[in-house]
Amino acid sequence: MSAPVIVLGAGPAGLAAAEAASASGQAVLLVDENNAPGGQIWRGGPQRWRDTRAAGLWTALRARPHVTWMAGARVVAPAGARALLLETADGALIQPWDKVIVCSGARELLLPFPGWTLPGVTCAGGLQALIKGGMPVAGKRVVVAGTGPLLLAVAATVREHGGVLVALAEHRDSGDLARFGARLALSHRGKLLQSLQLAARLRGVPYLRGAGVLAAEGSGRLERVLLRHRGREQALDCDFLACGFGLTPSLELATLFGCAVEQGRVLVDCAQRTSVQGVWAAGESTGIGGVDKALAEGRIAGLGAAGVAPQTKDLRVRGKAQAFADLLAQAFAPLPSLRAMCTDATIVCRCEDVVAADLAPHAGWRSAKLQTRAGMGPCQGRVCGSACAFLYGWEAPGLRQPVFPASAATLALPQAETQAETQAETQAQTQAETQAQTQRVDTLARAHPELPQQQTN
Ligand SMILES: Cc1cc2nc3c(=O)[nH]c(=O)nc-3n(C[C@H](O)[C@H](O)[C@H](O)COP(=O)(O)OP(=O)(O)OC[C@H]3O[C@@H](n4cnc5c(N)ncnc54)[C@H](O)[C@@H]3O)c2cc1C
């Protein structure tokens, strides 16, 4: 069997890629840092899935002996040419690769405002992930704020788990939302139906359109949120504030392979091939577009890696999903007015406690980093880099290896392996030389028995 196609990330894109690649008998290694497959939207593992697409893909993969599932393994760096360094709970390992599909998903765009570092304030999907992970919210008062369709999904999760939704505050105004709805009605009826179903689950929740977050307040932890709505300030008492301003592609893995990135997303061609030979990319890493885009792109990438051409239907499905992604990008791009949330005293780099007033005078990311240490903490600019790109128009910082924090033992592994290989090679060479010398001496002794015998070992 040929070397496995390695699929990095087991969200919708990764599951679809692994299924498509393995359908023709191609060996596949599916890797994810989470212990369960499903990515962001199907978080929590197969026992929790309600979406039949997730269950269908996973059942197919589990039935194929040539598919290997490696859970709890995070790719952190390259390990020489065409090998990856992975960290697991038990240690580290080096995985050679021939063909890889990067399905690394997205993270939330965090925009700073006064009080955003208080305990109780999370990003929107972050609160959803905590709830799905078992954090109780029954009886807790929750405000969901920001912009974009994820807010509805998060609010629905809060309500489903017994949380009390104080308000859902959307930054876009009624006009913007009506225009988005009309575009959905025209070309994406399925999506319109989904949003109406979500809205029905949120019946009775105050839905504030055109509302902006001013600050989160509390002594030691969140107690209230200040909003501006219809020209008036409002204070809403709450236990949690879940704030979402959209998503941004996770580029660490693509960067690790040296794939070209444009406008904050991995550049791919119509076959989902990246700029690097043998590397495909699919899902949110190539641009934010939701689960349908992730599934369609994953399938095309998986087929490509297995050497199978996609069918017209696959391309049509992806085209439709990409059109929805374009619509989302237009309808919910963070408005420039959101910059006003960040006051001079607002912390922007929360790892190094750097406030906006110290960052604003700089011309770019590099100078700000050198002078203030912004982006030099554990997140390495993953959070404040995107925030600064939005606030000041700075190009987000380039990522360094390792692309995720890793233990020293993990990082030492490639060197230890190289040393072990060199030692083994030297030993083998010495042995071969000794053998050759012994042979030469024996031959000499046989040819000239008159010579005195030599010690050869
Ligand atoms: C926090 C959050 C919540 C969301 N909630 C919803 C929702 O409720 N409803 C909805 O419609 N959409 C939601 N989305 C959007 C959703 O992510 C997409 O619609 C869809 O899941 C994208 O699929 P994907 O496969 O591209 O990425 P993901 O589902 O994000 O999967 C990427 C996978 O790659 C893995 N990975 C990344 N880097 C590494 C690494 N270095 N090593 C190993 N594994 C790695 C991750 O662990 C993850 O499992 C959410 C997004 C985010 C960020």
Image (tube, rainbow, N blue to C red):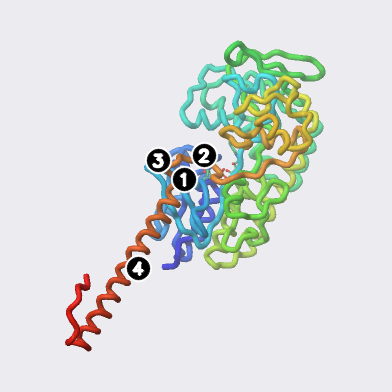
Q: At x 68% / y 51%, what residue is drawn?
A: 261
Say few, some or many: other residues with alpha carbon within 10 Å of mark 3 (under 14 / 14 to 19 / 20 or more): few
Say few, some or many: other residues with alpha carbon within 10 Å of mark 4 (under 14 / 14 to 19 / 20 or more): few
Residue 432: name its quadrant: bottom left
Which residue matches tag 4? Answer: 429
* Observer-nearest of 96 and 412: 412
Q: Nearer the viewer, mark 3 or mark 2?
A: 2
Q: Is residue 20 visible?
A: no
Which residue matches tag 1? Answer: 411
Q: Amino acid under label 1?
A: Leu
Say few, some or many: other residues with alpha carbon within 10 Å of mark 2 (under 14 / 14 to 19 / 20 or more): some
Q: Amino acid under label 2?
A: Pro
Q: Amino acid under label 3?
A: Ala
Q: Quadrant of the C terminus?
A: bottom left
Label 2 and label 4: CA atoms lie apart by 38 Å
- Asked if marks 4 and 1 touch (Cβ < 8 Å), the reply is no
Residue 179: name its quadrant: top right
Q: Is residue 366 visible?
A: yes
Q: Residue placed farthest to the bottom in the image?
A: 447
Tag on residue 89? Answer: 3
Q: Nearer the viewer, mark 2 or mark 4?
A: 4
Dot 2 or dot 1, earlier in sequence: 2
Dot 4 or dot 1, earlier in sequence: 1
Dot 3 or dot 2, earlier in sequence: 3
Which residue matches tag 2? Answer: 405
Label 4 and label 1: CA atoms lie apart by 28 Å
- Asked if marks 3 and 2 touch (Cβ < 8 Å), the reply is no
Dot 3 or dot 4, earlier in sequence: 3
Dot 3 or dot 1, earlier in sequence: 3
Point out residue 229 in the picture as x, y percentages from the top left corner: 77, 19
Secondary structure of the residue carrying tag 3 is loop
Q: Residue placed farthest to the top in the image?
A: 219
